Image (cartoon, rainbow, N blue to C red):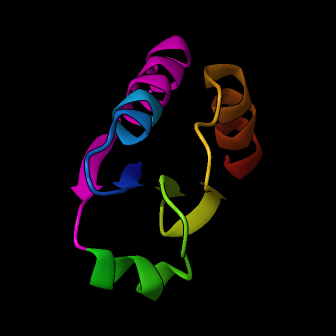
C-alpha cells in the first residue's frame, strides 16, 4: 500500500500523516508513506486545497485533517 500526504508541511499535513500511520498500525498493514510537498504536483491529483490523502493512487480526502477512524474505514473500503 502506498500512501501519499500532499501538503507543504504545515501542522495539518503533519497531523494527517500521523492519523494515516495510526490507521495503518491499527489495521496491522504495511504501507509506504510519501510526502508530496511540491504545490505543482498537487494539481496532478486535482487537489487545490491541502492537506491531501492519496492511497494507492486514489485521492480519498483533501482540504481537511481526516480522523484516524475515518481513514480506517477508507482503507477497509479499498481492500
Name the residue nearer the viewer: 27 or 46: 46
Taking 11 as reference, is 3 above or below it?
below
Residue that sits furthest to the top in the current view? 26
Q: Residue at x 40, y 50 (%)?
A: 3
Q: Is residue 43 above or below residue 31?
A: below
Residue at 30% from the left image edge and 85% from the top image edge: 40
What residue appears at the point 32 percent right and 42 percent down from the top-left corner?
Answer: 10
| Image location (x, y in percent) of residue 11 | 35, 33
Question: Residue 55: x percent and y percent?
Answer: 51, 55
* Quadrant in the rendering for residue 38: bottom left
Magenta highlight on residue 33: yes
Is residue 50 left or right of 35 when viewed as pictured?
A: right
Instruction: Assess whether residue 63 is covered by the magenta stretch.
Output: no
Q: Position of residue 48 (x, y in %)?
A: 54, 75
Range of the magenta residues?
Answer: 17-38
Q: Is residue 55 above or below residue 66?
A: below
Amino acid at each position: 500500500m502506498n500512501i501519499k500526504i500532499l501538503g507543504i508541511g504545515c501542522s495539518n499535513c503533519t497531523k494527517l500523516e500521523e492519523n494515516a500511520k495510526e490507521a495503518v498500525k491499527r489495521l496491522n498493514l504495511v504501507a509506504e508513506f510519501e510526502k508530496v510537498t511540491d504545490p505543482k504536483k498537487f494539481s496532478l491529483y486535482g487537489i487545490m486545497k491541502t492537506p491531501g490523502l492519496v492511497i494507492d493512487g486514489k485521492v480519498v480526502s483533501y482540504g481537511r485533517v481526516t480522523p484516524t477512524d475515518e481513514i480506517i474505514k477508507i482503507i477497509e473500503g479499498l481492500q
